[in-house]
Image (tube, helix red, strand yellow):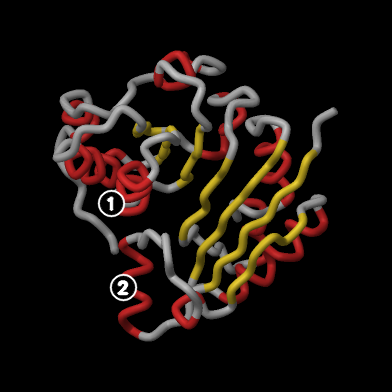
């Protein structure tokens, strides 16, 4: 799902309702931006925004943040979000490699939806469920860490299960074929819709751990 670059996408983002410029300046203060103490859920990889917008609509008592590193991709999501009225949604351009520079023990739940599998061994450190990233997430979570992952890539899924376990996470729920289970409350991403319509298996897991004293 490659998108053609949109000219001046970075400037056009400033015209949308839910986009925050220079988000790292708000580290530790996102509750003030939302103006409440509701839980904050984070998605890494906004895509076209179907998931995070759907979640914001379904759960108005939860605050949702989604980050995306590509301007053109994020602009598509921002324009889609502008069609609705939310007080629990923020969209930001940010690279997850520096996620600990963006949040300070503020996140309650993290979503990793159809992340790049980076299949080559030399790229393992780029996978969003690698030990390197899991250590970064430790710095952004509150007392309890909860991660939900969905992917169509079985090798990435198997890798992630091992990585989660090695990092002290407990598996709360797992599906090896999501669309043969109860889909109540499931919000699709655009990738998920495409893959499920082709009949591809969707793998899902939710893990958690308590790590702070």
Horizontal arrangement in the rendering, residue 112 relative to residue 8 (left or right): right
The one nearer the camera, 135 or 193, is 193
Q: Residue furthest right?
A: 213
The numbered disc on residue 194 is: 2
Horizontal arrangement in the rendering, residue 31 relative to residue 209 (left or right): left
Quarter of the image where one finds residue 171: bottom right
Q: Residue furthest bottom?
A: 199
The numbered disc on residue 120 is: none
2 or 1: tag closer to the N-terminus: 1
Placement of the N terminus among the 4 image quadrants: bottom left
Mark 1 lies on a secondary structure that is loop
Q: Is residue 107 above or below residue 209?
A: above
Quarter of the image where one finds residue 176: bottom right
Q: Which residue is found at the position 73% from the left and 40% from the top?
A: 135
Q: Which residue is found at the position 19% from the left and 26% from the top?
A: 11
Q: Is residue 74 above or below residue 151?
A: above
The one nearer the camera, 163 or 143, is 143
Cα–Cα gap, marks 2 and 1: 13 Å
Reading the image, the residue beneath label 1 is 48
Q: Which residue is found at the position 56% from the left and 62% from the top?
A: 118
Residue 213 x/y as whole percent: 85, 28
Residue 185 visible at all: yes
Q: Is residue 34 above or below residue 76?
A: above
Horizontal arrangement in the rendering, residue 19 relative to residue 185 (left or right): left
Residue 90 x/y as whole percent: 36, 31
Residue 14 x/y as whole percent: 21, 24
Q: Residues within 10 Å of mark 2 (few under 14, many from 20)?
A: few
Horizontal arrangement in the rendering, residue 52 relative to residue 137 (left or right): left
The one nearer the camera, 21 or 35, is 35
Mark 2 lies on a secondary structure that is helix
């Amino acid at each position: 799902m490659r998108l053609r670059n949109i000219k001046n996408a970075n400037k056009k983002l400033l015209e949308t309702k839910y986009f925050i410029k220079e988000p790292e300046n708000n580290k530790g203060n996102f509750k003030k931006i939302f103006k409440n103490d509701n839980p904050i859920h984070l998605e890494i990889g906004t895509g076209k925004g179907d998931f995070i917008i759907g979640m914001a609509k379904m759960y108005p008592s939860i605050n949702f943040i989604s980050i995306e590193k590509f301007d053109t991709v994020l602009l598509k999501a921002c324009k889609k979000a502008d069609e609705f009225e939310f007080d629990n949604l923020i969209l930001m351009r940010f690279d997850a490699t520096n996620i600990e520079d963006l949040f300070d023990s503020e996140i309650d739940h993290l979503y990793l939806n159809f992340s790049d599998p980076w299949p080559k061994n030399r790229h393992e450190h780029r996978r969003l469920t690698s030990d390197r990233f899991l250590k970064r997430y430790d710095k952004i979570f509150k007392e309890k860490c909860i991660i939900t992952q969905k992917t169509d890539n079985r090798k990435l899924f198997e890798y992630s299960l091992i990585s989660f376990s090695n990092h002290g996470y407990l598996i709360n729920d797992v599906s090896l074929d999501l669309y043969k289970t109860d889909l109540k409350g499931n919000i699709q991403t655009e990738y998920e819709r495409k893959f499920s319509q082709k009949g591809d298996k969707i793998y899902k897991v939710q893990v958690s751990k308590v790590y702070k004293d």
